[in-house]
Image: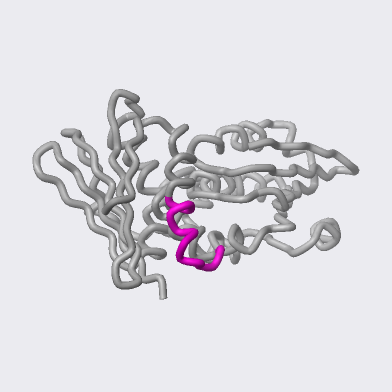
Amino acid sequence: MEHAIRISCTRRNLKVVRDFVSDFLLRYHLTDLLVNQIVLAVDEVVANLIIHGNSEDESQFLDVRVDVVNQEFGIEIEDTNLTSYSPTSYHEPDLQEYVRIGKKGGVGMMLVNRIMDRVEFTTHGSHNLCRLYKKLR
Amino acid sequence: MKITQQATDNTLTLSLDGELDASSSVVLDTELSKAEILNNQKVLIDCRQLNYISSAGLGVFISHLQRFQDAGVKLVFFNMQEKVHNVFEILGLDSLMTIVPSEAEATAI
């Protein structure tokens, strides 16, 4: 993956990653809806890694790499942190219940799982890797 | 995220300008958390200049919806861009929240 960016773990860099992904996707002439969906899914994962995985520690970094192979968009988001963010116990939330109790968070991975074709989280020691894939055609 | 307010006859209109993400949504949350907002009969959200929303922005609306309903305050979205409306649709929030095409329809509710 030759298209890459490294960001420090601050919420201010969410916009930086969104612009990086949308700029990369420009060359594929996709619909606004599809670009927005992919950018959104990436934004959700990056936000979780910055906020929950790295506690917004600006001395920590995320490496983001994107590519399109055989009409499939792929992104790798990598960090080195002993506190891995890996939502293996994910259950789709009940939004009506969230409304009833006034819950503020918890729908980000729901968006990611509904938008992307494949979502993978792997951890080896302090090395964490998230991969997302989406068919473009 | 820039939020412009306009108050008329028991209706407060909040015009959102920019992107609602995990960094900027706190500004909106602060506005919707104010106690006096419940003095309105309707709170209209003008989304014409809302270019992006993530789960953090959606979460702000989800977290206040019941509070508004309990107080008898109608929360109505209008002028929503297709790509933003699509995000509500992906989660099915378009069936839990009131989203109409135009300001005229929002005012008529």
Q: Residue B8 location, x and y as percent? A: 89, 42
Q: Nearer the viewer, residue A37 or B35?
A: A37
A1 in the magenta segment:
no
Pick the front one: B34 or A133: A133
Residue visible at 35% across and 35% down in the picture:
A7
Main SS of the magenta segment?
helix
Q: Residue furthest right?
A: B9
Residue drawn 66% across the image and 59% down it: B81
In the rendered picture of this protein, how many numbered marks are placed on residues? 0
- Quadrant in which the C terminus of chain A is drawn: bottom left
Query: In the image as oriented, which residue stretches furthest toward the bottom?
Result: A137
Image side of residue B40 versus residue A137, left or right: right
From the viewer's side, name the closer residue of A24 and B86. Answer: A24
Instruction: Tell me if residue B74 comes above or below residue B109 in the rendering.
Output: above
Q: Indicate left or right for B17 with A101 as reference.
A: right
In which quadrant of the rendered view does residue B11 lie? top right
Above or below for B68 versus A68: above
Q: Where is residue A13, by image quadrant?
A: top left
Looking at the image, residue B12 sits to the left or right of residue A125; the answer is right
Residues in magenta, as a range: A21-32
Task: Give the residue at x 49% y 59%.
Answer: A26
**Where residue A84 sits in the image (x, y, percent)?**
21, 40
On screen, residue A116 above or below B54: below
Q: At 51% across and 58% down in the image, what residue appears?
A: A36
Indicate the position of residue B36 as horizontal and vertical percent values: 74, 32
Q: Position of residue A117 (x, y in %)?
A: 33, 68
Foreground pick, A70 / B29: A70
Q: Is residue A4 above or below residue B88?
A: above
In the picture, which quadrant includes the N terminus of chain A? bottom left
